[in-house]
Image (cartoon, rainbow, N blue to C red):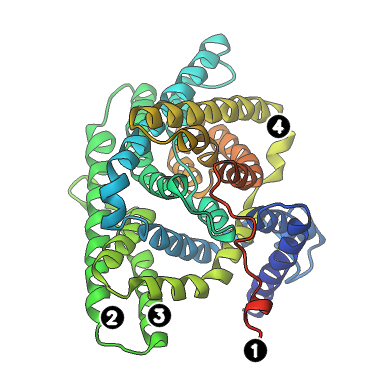
Amino acid sequence: METMLLCLAIALIFGLIMSRFAKLINLPAVTAYLIGGLILGPFVLGRLGLSGIGFNSLEQVEGFKIISQTALGFIAFAIGNEFRVSSLKTMGKQAITVGIFQAVITTVIVDAIMIVVYFIEPTIITLPAAITLGAIAAATAPAATLMVVKQYKANGPLTKLLLMVVAIDDAVGLVLFSVSFGIATAIEAGHLNVVSVIVEPIIEIILSLALGAVAGVLLNQLEKYFHSRSKRMALSIGFVVLTVAVSMTEFKIGGVTCGFSLLLVCMMTGTVFCNICETSDELMDRVDRWTSPLNILFFVLSGAELNLNILGDPLILLIGCVYIISRSAGKMIGSYVSCKASHASEETTKHLGPTLLPQAGVALGMTIQAAELSDGAILRNVVLFSVLVYELVGPTITKIALTKAGEIDPSGKSNARTVNVVK
């Protein structure tokens, strides 16, 4: 137990120290946390085998998964705050249009290029793996995006649309992956399972949204019985942790597997709560401050999780580069076309694509199920390689895009030491 606490304490402090170095070269703090995790991970300091100083193995990092899952829950809860009725009236239709079409276009482009690679050289990748990679490409990482937005206090039409789109991505990506994986499995097995391709993903989305809505209503009702800020904040935190725990459960009804999407559940909880609670703004701000250390740990652990062994496999590097290029092209083209179709502003149309490049947890979660394919191990390593690249450069690209769109104010970040001076 003391070793675990020591690891977490060092991870948190080291991540913060790395963020100071990142500031000197104008990099987002998210990138610093990820690099800090890499240094503390099994392939750098972890190799020394010193107890508590770094993570000695990927299995040890995996042991802290509950922290990462909880952090994702709070990140999704915060994104739910963007789906207020006032915002939905002005941008809801546009967000849904862009969220769906950019994901579908990305999947089609990656699928097409990967299938071409298969026909050119079938020994490089199988057809089922090529089809599955296209669907995984649709997923976008909300965590890195939200952290960049918060760090630089980004605000404007692009930022508001971006936060809505990355949330919608989870639902769209889930459906696309389920359909693609079902087709891939059918190609390998010789028959199509309609339940796993259509029924289960629809049930998962419905159950997730229903659970999130119920949790949001209950949180609002219970919040009325507490008047102190600290108790109301504690209740909100407890509810998010509760929804994370429940969303990790799975059960079967007949032959149908029923489960929940953690991101969708927590996002819906935040959405419902923010729309029916009059004091939600103040509560969300307090919860956000409380979860700051948790978010830092999330990214440090994510960095420690990145497997550097894959860099020694030429085949993985080849497929990975093709995947990264095709996915990047898909996100850029998809966002541009869908923004044009939904009559978004010129600045939003030009700069949304680069902000959708980060990819992490959701995509890796999909590869766990994709491991059932004959090429499952190769597919997971390809996605791991892309996550390594996207997570390290994605936050910086997002920052540059938001800056070019004029939604990051260079003077917007205040100094707590200056602000808190007693006059």
Left or right of residue 49, residue 417 in this image: left
Q: Residue at x 28, y 37 (%)?
A: 196
Viewer-nearest of labels 2 and 4? 2
User: Which quadrant of the view contains residue 272?
Assistant: bottom left
Location of the N terminus by quadrant is: bottom right
Disc 1 residue type? Lys
Would you call the spot at circle 1 few (<14 residues within 10 Å), some (14-19), or many (20 or more)?
few
Foreground residue, 334 or 346?
346
Q: Give the residue pinned by disc 1.
A: 423
**Callout 3: SS:** helix
Height in image: 402 above or below 260? above
**Farthest residue, direction left:** 254
Q: Give the residue pinned by disc 3.
A: 233
Closer to the chain start, of discs 2 and 3, is 2
Label 2 – label 3 distance at C-alpha: 9 Å
**Callout 4: SS:** loop
Location of the C terminus by quadrant is: bottom right
Viewer-nearest of labels 1 and 4? 1
Q: Give the residue pinned by disc 4.
A: 313
Label 3 – label 4 distance at C-alpha: 48 Å
Assess whether mark 3 and mark 1 are in contact (beta carbons under 8 angstroms): no
